[in-house]
Each structure stands twice: as structure tokens, then as C-alpha cells.
Image (cartoon, helix red, strand yellow):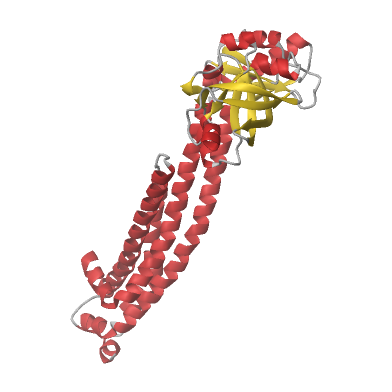
Amino acid sequence: MFLKSIKSLLFAKARTFLTMSGIAVGVFSVVLISAVGSIGTQQVSSAMISMGVDTLLVQAADNTVSVTLTDSDVSAVRTVEGVSDAMPLMSSITEAKMLGNRLDCWLWGVDSSADRLISLFAEHGRLITNADDAARAKVCVIDEQFALDTYGRRNVVGKKLTLFLGSRFHEFEIVGVAKSGLSAVQGMMSGVVPGFMYIPISTMQSLCGRTTYDKIAVKISDINADGRIVEKVVNKLNAINGLNDGYICNNLLSQKESLEEIMSIVTLALSLVAGISLFVSGISVMTTMMMSVSERTREIGIKKATGAKKRDICAEFLMQSVSLSLIGGAAGIAAGILVAFAGCTVLKVPFMIDSAYLVISIAATIGVGTVFGVYPALKAAGLNPAEALRG
């Protein structure tokens, strides 16, 4: 019956093509939006994972500006059950000069454990070492996007730059080019997300005239126990410093889950908006089938006169309506997947799509064909044979 339906639809090729195109556009929008949402969610998730969702960031609470973090606090955190390592951090958004260009950068003071706690690894050269930290060396590690923005290549080890710290510029030697968990985000949002740069934390303290830290990065051994460890770390710091609510602990895992939930909601909302076009296409399907009934009135009369029952006529026209929608939907799904795959290839990101949205799209097209094909099918089945033959 499906092939017979297709043959009947080909009697009005232009009208059939336009109706199928309308359905295809609606399904294409839904599939493409769902693919973009799935890929975006996966990229955010990957970036958060590579940043280290098993890492907590401890800092002074906003309402306790007098609270500081010291070496003794770092040592205390390391003794908390469930903590595998801890590292002091300093950070500042400042300015760098390189090849005569003035660029904003996010500067981090780290020690030799940076690669373990913030998922940092050297693409070229090396990372900050214990020797650099002990000597308060003026050396730096820059991220690969920073290198590309200035020199147009990734390997710039041995080059010099100047950093604004402690009210004046200081010359640093680049000893490494690193890739971090945020490299993918920086690549997609170059010019919005500033380049990352890393220097020995002792050097940053010396140039800024400080002995304290901004944050403590805490590596946890069991990611499923992150909530309990957060509480233990905060309580430990409050206890040894005689404070109440003096510290806060940011959990990257909870932020990852929140971001994924938000992106899923946005994707669903946009897909529903795109799905409205399917409803509009359904009206086109009904119009096409009504015209088909009018053009085939005599044919319907002959079939009824030769013994065709109402349900046979109804089933035939309903199948045509569903076939019309299904072919248009299949074309829309194929186009959506193809465009999404091409975009991923250009952007060099892994392709993925939520199969649930494909199933929903197929079900929606069948539903559109069925719902909007019922009335024309019933009208065809209800024609009086004698009047149909005269038509």
C-alpha cells in the first residue's frame, strides 16, 4: 500500500514536493537544534571534566575580606579525610606585552603540582617546576591560544614577554606552552575568553608583595563523596582559624551538572519552537490531501461501485498522508544530521546527536500525517458513489 500511495502522490509532483519540503524544513530545524544542543552540552562537559571536576576551589567568603589563606591552611586541608592533594593558587587579570601587542591575560600563580590539580599539560617545553618556585624565577607558561594569537604558531618556547604586576611591567621568559581544560572554550571564544598564563606562585607573591594566597585547589579521592568533603574542608579551616562561615568551597562537579541541565532545557525549548513549523506543515498536508480527494472523485466513485469499502478508501488516503509526511521527515532528518556533521568537521569537535530527538522527530512526522490526513480520508470514504461517478 505504501508504494501505491507514492505512485498516487506523483500525479501532482510540484504540489507533493512543496508539501514534503515544508515538513522537511520543520524536522530539519528540530534535528539541527537538538544536535547543536547535544554537541554543546558534550563540549561543556568535556571542558569541565578536563579542568578536573574532582577538584574543589576553596577561598575566603565574600563577606570576610580580612580572612586569608596561608601555608598552614594548605597543610591543614591536605590532612582532611578524602583529600588526595592540595595546591595554593593566586590569580589576577592583568596585561601582557608580546611582539608590541598589549593583550589581556588571566594570570595564575601555581606550583609544580599544577598538572595534577588543574589538568594542565605541556604541549611544548615544560611546566613550572619546584626549582622555579624556590628561585622565584621570572618564567612563565602560556596557553596555546595565547601563542596563536601573538606569534601565529604554538611553539614559542624561549621567547620573552612582559607582564604587569605590582604596579609595573616585568620581563618573563616563556618556558612552556600548555593545553588546559579551557583550551577548547578559548578556541571557540577567542577574543572573549582571555589567554591563560602561569608563573611560579612564589614569584607572583614576591612581585605583588604578598605572603598569602587567593585560593586552594583541592583534589578529592572519591568524586561521589564531594558534598561531604566540601563540608569537612570548610569546617577544618574554620576550626583552625577560629571562624564561623569564613570560607566557601566551589564544587566544579555541581557546576557541571547545573550547566548540563540548563543547556538541556534550552535545547528542549528551542526544539519545541522549531516544532511549531511541523504543525504549520500539517495544514499543508491537509490541503494537499483535500485537493487530491477533489481531483480523484471519479476514481473513488469507480472503486466504490466495484465493491471497495469505506475503510479501504479511508486507509488508502490516510496512508498517502502518512507517506507524504514520512518522506519529508526522513529528508529533514538526513539534512539535519548532514549539516550537523559538516559543522562538527569544520569546527573539529566530536559529532553526536541525541537519538531520542530522532525518534521523536519520526514519531512527530507520522503523527502529523495521521492527524491532518484523517479529515480528507474520511471525506473521501464518505463520498456517494453515484455523485462521485458524475464528478
* Residue most extreme to the left: 306
Residue nearer the viewer, 351 or 324: 351
Front-most of 162 and 382?
162
From this view, report whether residue 212 is shown above or below residue 25: above
Q: Is residue 328 visible?
A: yes
244 left or right of 123 in image: right
154 horizontally vs 105: left or right: left
Residue 342 or residue 121, whichever sits in front: 121
Q: In this rendering, does residue 353 appear at all?
A: no
User: Which image quarter is the C terminus in?
Assistant: bottom left
Q: Is residue 341 left or right of residue 44?
A: left
Point out the residue furthest to the front here.
100
Is residue 317 left or right of 30 when viewed as pictured?
left
Query: Which percent across, then down, holds residue 192?
Result: 61, 41
Where residue 114 sits in the image (x, y, percent)? 56, 18
Q: Residue at x 44, y 71 (%)?
A: 283
Looking at the image, residue 23 lies above or below residue 148: below
Which quarter of the rendered picture does the N terminus lie within?
bottom left
Q: Quadrant of residue 380?
A: bottom left
Which residue is painted at 41% across and 57% down in the image? 28
Residue at x-position 49% and y-position 53%: 271
